[in-house]
Image (tube, helix red, strand yellow):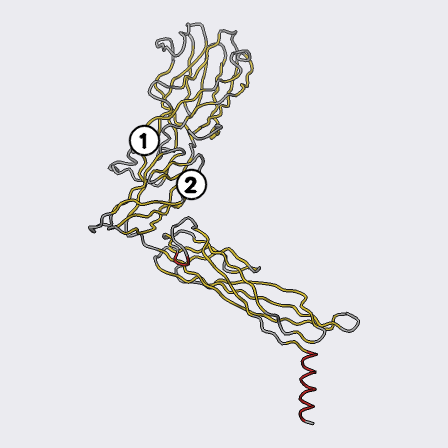
């Protein structure tokens, strides 16, 4: 009788209830930097360099279901355990997969642990298929990968080819800021006080929107941006690194004029303008041109003025030409005080006008776009607009203004 009762109980349990176990598994691996010649969780990164991890989760088995119960929803969430000296983003989220970045300013091996939780919503139905009740079951699982931040055991610098001093006494010319299209080199040196022999090995990334690296040579990109370079070097016969260094690329943002001569009256002539007779109104000046910012080089970058239409009125309404002509020069060497010269010595901007037309007030304005183009650009890029204003005031006075320089000439 006892055996029959136990058998009946067993039959009842097997019909009315399902027993199962849920196991959550997590797969996590480092995906970036993916171009390094190392694999597995010990992939090296430099200080302050982002490492990216791909984490995915799943489960085996099923939650416990009673009679008339069904799983009606499955939701995933995850959290990333905080780690001292490591910046992690994001630290939590939803879904069964995640992309996580981590970096540290300190060398060391750090465990990046991601915990996933899966929550099952279980609904019990009545005989008429309406909801009787709901409940939830939660299960968790974790996975880890190692953020391996290395001290490079050497120093790394960026040295531009156009090595003009940045300030008084700076003869090394090291700087992490480059102009668009600028050429530079990666320099590695031994640590102070050591006897190590250090030679450059390789650097990553080989190519990005900001820079292109070929061996130890760097070419800045065509637009403003920044990049962290990871440099490897052979120290006493062993490849060490990476040692990270940031590089910033900037575009031209301004033009400086340095006036070199002007017409005030008729005691002065220049081959750049035809002589103006005493009875003809007009004014002009000639200026050297330099590109800013002044703390980078734009050698080889084409810089100049694009075309534009004029605004004209009064006595200058019919003054030709209506359209401003375009012209461009390649930049040459410079210094911290002036920046790079637009063109070579002798390439100047000739700013002015003269008018044989009847007297009276008149005005002509050009809003002139300035653009640049590197050797690898297809189209020019405008970075500045400079107004050139030419004005007759009354019968005798003429004024020309451009880029902060104003010249006034009055006929006798």
Above or below residue 38? Residue 359 is above
Which numbered marker is on residue 368? none
Distance in Å between CA atoms under marks 1 and 2: 32 Å
Q: Nearer the viewer, residue 173 or 236?
A: 236
Task: Work out which residue is located at the far bottom of the displayed protein and give it.
Answer: 1
Q: Residues within 10 Å of mark 1 (few under 14, many from 20)?
A: few
Q: Are marks 1 and 2 in contact (CB under 8 Å)?
A: no
Question: Is 159 drawn above or below residue 315 in the view shown?
Answer: below
Disc sitting over residue 207 in the figure: 2
Name the residue nearer the viewer: 40 or 274.
Answer: 40
Residue annotated with mark 1:
337
* Disc 1 versus disc 2: nearer the observer: 2
Which of the two discs, 1 and 2, labels the residue nearer the N terminus? 2
Q: Secondary structure at mark 1?
A: loop
Residue 95: x %, y % from top left: 57, 59
Q: Quadrant of the C terminus?
A: top left
Residue 343 figure quarter: top left
């Amino acid at each position: 009788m006892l055996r029959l009762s136990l058998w009946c109980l067993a039959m009842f349990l097997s019909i009315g209830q399902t027993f199962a176990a849920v196991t959550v598994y997590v797969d996590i691996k480092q995906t970036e930097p993916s171009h390094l010649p190392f694999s597995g969780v010990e992939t090296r990164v430099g200080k302050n360099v982002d490492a990216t991890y791909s984490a995915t989760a799943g489960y085996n088995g099923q939650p416990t279901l009673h009679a008339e119960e069904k799983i009606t929803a499955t939701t995933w969430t995850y959290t990333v355990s905080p780690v001292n000296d490591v910046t992690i983003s994001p630290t939590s989220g939803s879904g069964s997969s995640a992309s996580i970045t981590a970096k540290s300013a300190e060398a060391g091996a750090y465990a990046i642990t991601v915990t996933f939780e899966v929550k099952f919503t279980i609904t019990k139905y009545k005989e008429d298929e309406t909801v009787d009740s709901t409940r939830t079951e939660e299960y968790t699982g974790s996975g880890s990968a190692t953020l391996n931040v290395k001290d490079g055991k050497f120093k790394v610098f960026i040295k531009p080819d156009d090595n003009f001093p940045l300030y008084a006494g700076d003869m090394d010319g090291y700087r992490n800021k480059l102009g668009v299209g600028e050429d530079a080199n990666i320099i590695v040196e031994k640590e102070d006080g050591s006897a190590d022999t250090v030679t450059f090995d390789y650097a990553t990334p080989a190519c990005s929107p900001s820079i292109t690296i070929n061996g130890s040579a760097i070419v800045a990109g065509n637009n403003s941006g920044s990049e962290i370079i990871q440099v490897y070097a052979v120290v006493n016969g062993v490849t060490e690194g990476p040692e990270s260094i940031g590089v910033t690329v900037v575009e031209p943002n301004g033009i400086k004029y340095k006036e070199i001569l002007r017409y005030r009256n008729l005691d002065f002539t220049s081959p750049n303008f035809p002589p103006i007779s005493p009875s003809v109104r007009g004014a002009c000046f000639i200026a050297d041109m330099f590109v800013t910012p002044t703390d980078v080089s734009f050698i080889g970058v084409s810089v100049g003025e694009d075309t534009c239409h004029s605004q004209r009125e009064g006595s200058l309404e019919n003054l030709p030409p209506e359209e401003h002509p375009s012209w461009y020069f390649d930049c040459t060497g410079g210094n911290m005080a002036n920046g790079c010269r637009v063109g070579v010595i002798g390439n100047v901007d000739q700013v002015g006008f003269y008018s044989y037309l009847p007297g009276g007030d008149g005005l002509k304005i050009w809003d002139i776009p300035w653009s640049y183009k590197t050797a690898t650009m297809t189209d020019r890029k405008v970075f500045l607009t400079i107004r050139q204003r030419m004005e007759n005031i009354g019968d005798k006075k003429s004024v020309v203004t451009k880029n902060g320089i104003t010249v006034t000439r009055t006929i006798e």
